[in-house]
């Protein structure tokens, strides 16, 4: 029983595998679909035509044979009746002898093999016995045929199955051959009315029909093979260039811009190949120009950034002198010196960001990864943001897990990402709360920065990492940002093989999520923290100002795994 079950399971698995392979071949190959569809339609059409022709041949052969049988039996019946009418038999014995002679004469007088039965009609005196060439014929005459023969005038016929084990190799196994039974009444002197039946064998017509059907089947099979071969050849001529075009397109997409299709002939497919090659040539030239332009632009940005450092250093020296002596100036000049110092700091930050972006664009940025506890990096970024949060009146909370969150990261780049996110959140928090949360699982670590400020739309979230992009162009950068911080943060995240995502809701704040793999080479499948935050409790509307002394922090519930700092 167990062996049979295993055999059945193995057969079922093989059947499922074969079905999947056929399904894959059907979906992945245009040539297979075309050939299969053509063969299916051809088989259905040939089956319909074959059935129709077979029925017509069968009906034609049968009708022709029946008409011949009826005509022949009518003449034989007339001859038998004339023999009976001309007989001079005066006794029962002579009548019986006459009946037997006529039966033998009728049996041998046909155009083919036939049997004869002379059966006394019902209601006659049993003076003369029936004459039959084969006693088994009595069982072939049905009651309906006898009733129709005795009650009506003229011929009556019926198709019957003739038990004959020697009538052909194909039907001998069944023991029945097709036949036709024809009946008509005759008058026998001194004996009364008799039923005269002729049994004609249709085995020759059956064999002829089977021969025609075999020829038709062989012709249909040859036609199907020819149709499949022709379809395969034609579709192959069409599919091969298409496959070549697909392979060339894949090679071009992989960066092999010099890939081209082989072109032969002057037909439509050759025209397609030439058009494809011309398109590929145009794309190669256009991409080459774009790469050259991009290289020039990156070189220009890098060169400009480097060249501006020398005059910037000179200007900064002069600005520091003026800023140091600002107390001796008039109020308007003093204010100008302070503004110049602030803008010089911003200008220097912008040059640094431009140089960093140019390194990313040139592919020269490198990752100095090391095994670090991400909690330390998050704490350092939060410490850097505390003064700005206090100045802006923003409540900053940091939630860190108790367990160590180790990951292979570049601490400098990760801290820069978190600083940019915190500065951006504090700038847009409008005096509300900014929450930083760190979590980890076996594959990744995640940090979310959530604010409850003005928020942003889905369209803004899709463009927030674009360079120099602002949701509101009229909004000033109160923290002195360069417009490149989030773009650099995104590049830093990608350099780690991680994600940096944004979510926002107008009037409901925004949330940024940084997800990094814990080990190099891990492909992220998910994040330990959700991007769309759950409904937060209402932030405190008027938080009390407190100094940044850790001893002065508000008391928190011991079960909370985070610290809140204002």
Image: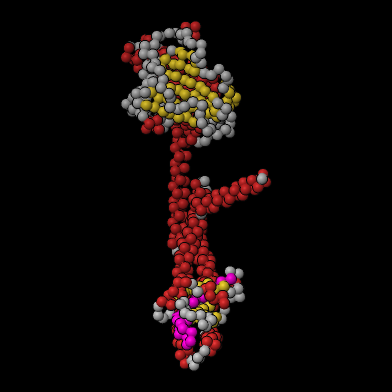
Horizontal side of 194 relative to 338 (left or right) equals right
Where is residue 180 drawn, in percent x and y? 49, 76
Name the residue rendered at 46%, 8% in the picture: 554
Where is residue 156 drawn, in percent x and y? 44, 77
Where is residue 441 drawn, in percent x and y? 55, 26
Query: Quick one: 291 or 392, which is closer to the camera?
Result: 392
Query: Quick one: 519 or 106, which is closer to the camera?
Result: 106
Horizontal side of 9 relative to 77 (left or right) equals right
Where is residue 400 drawn, in percent x and y? 52, 18
- What secondary structure is the magenta-colored segment mainly? strand
Question: In the rendered image, is residue 191 in sight?
Answer: yes
Question: Which residues lie in the magenta part?
Answer: 175-195
- 288, above or below 160, in the image: above
Name the residue rendered at 50%, 59% in the picture: 36
Residue 188 lies within the magenta run:
yes
Name the residue rendered at 62%, 48% in the picture: 8
Residue 365 lies within the magenta run:
no
Query: Quick one: 358 or 59, which is closer to the camera?
Result: 59
Q: For the N terminus, which image quadrant?
A: top right
- 352, above or below 57, in the image: above
């Amino acid at each position: 029983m167990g062996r049979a079950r295993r055999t059945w399971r193995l057969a079922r698995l093989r059947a499922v595998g074969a079905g999947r392979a056929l399904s894959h071949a059907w979906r992945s190959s245009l040539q297979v679909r075309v050939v299969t569809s053509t063969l299916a339609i051809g088989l259905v059409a040939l089956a319909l035509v074959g059935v129709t022709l077979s029925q017509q041949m069968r009906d034609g052969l049968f009708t022709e044979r029946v008409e011949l049988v009826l005509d022949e039996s009518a003449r034989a019946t007339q001859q038998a009746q004339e023999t009976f009418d001309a007989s001079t038999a005066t006794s029962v014995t002579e009548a019986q002898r006459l009946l037997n002679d006529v039966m033998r004469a009728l049996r041998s007088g046909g155009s083919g093999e036939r049997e004869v039965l002379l059966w006394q009609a019902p209601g006659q005196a049993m003076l003369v016995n029936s004459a039959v060439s084969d006693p088994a014929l009595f069982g072939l005459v049905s009651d309906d045929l006898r009733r129709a023969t005795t009650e009506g005038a003229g011929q009556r016929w019926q198709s019957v199955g003739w038990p004959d084990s020697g009538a052909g190799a194909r039907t001998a196994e069944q023991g029945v051959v097709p036949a036709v039974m024809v009946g008509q009444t005759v008058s026998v002197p001194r004996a009364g009315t008799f039923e005269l039946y002729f049994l004609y064998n249709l085995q020759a017509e059956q064999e002829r029909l089977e021969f025609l059907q075999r020829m038709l089947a062989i012709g249909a099979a040859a036609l199907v093979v020819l149709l499949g071969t022709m379809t395969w050849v034609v579709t192959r001529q069409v599919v091969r260039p298409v496959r070549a075009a697909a392979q060339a397109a894949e090679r071009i997409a992989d960066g092999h811009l010099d890939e081209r299709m082989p072109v032969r002939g002057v037909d439509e497919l050759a025209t397609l190949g030439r058009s494809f090659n011309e398109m590929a040539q145009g794309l190669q030239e256009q991409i080459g120009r774009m790469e050259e332009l991009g290289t020039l632009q990156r070189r220009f940005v890098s060169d400009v950034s480097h060249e501006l450092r020398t005059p910037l250093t000179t200007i900064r020296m002069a600005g520091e002198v003026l800023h140091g002596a600002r107390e001796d100036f008039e109020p308007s000049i003093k204010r100008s010196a302070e503004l110049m110092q602030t803008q010089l700091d911003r200008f220097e930050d912008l040059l640094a960001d431009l140089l960093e972006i140019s390194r990313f664009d040139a592919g020269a940025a490198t990752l100095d990864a090391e095994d670090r506890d991400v909690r330390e990096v998050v704490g350092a970024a939060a410490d850097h943001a505390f003064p700005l949060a206090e100045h802006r009146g923003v409540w900053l909370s940091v939630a860190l897990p108790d367990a160590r969150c180790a990951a292979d990261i570049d601490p400098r780049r990760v801290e820069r990402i978190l600083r940019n996110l915190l500065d951006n959140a504090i700038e847009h928090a409008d005096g509300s709360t900014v929450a930083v949360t760190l979590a980890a699982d076996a594959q990744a670590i995640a940090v979310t920065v959530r604010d409850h400020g003005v928020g942003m739309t889905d369209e803004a979230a899709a463009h927030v990492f674009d360079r120099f992009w602002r949701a509101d162009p009229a909004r000033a950068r109160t923290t002195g940002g360069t417009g490149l911080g989030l773009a650099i943060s995104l590049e830093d995240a990608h350099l780690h093989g991680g994600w940096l995502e944004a979510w926002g809701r107008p009037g409901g704040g925004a949330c940024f999520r940084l997800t990094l793999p814990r080990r190099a080479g891990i492909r992220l499948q998910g994040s330990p923290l959700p991007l769309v935050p759950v409904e937060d409790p209402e932030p405190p509307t008027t938080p009390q100002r407190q100094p940044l002394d850790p001893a002065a922090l508000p008391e928190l519930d011991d079960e909370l795994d985070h610290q809140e700092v204002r």
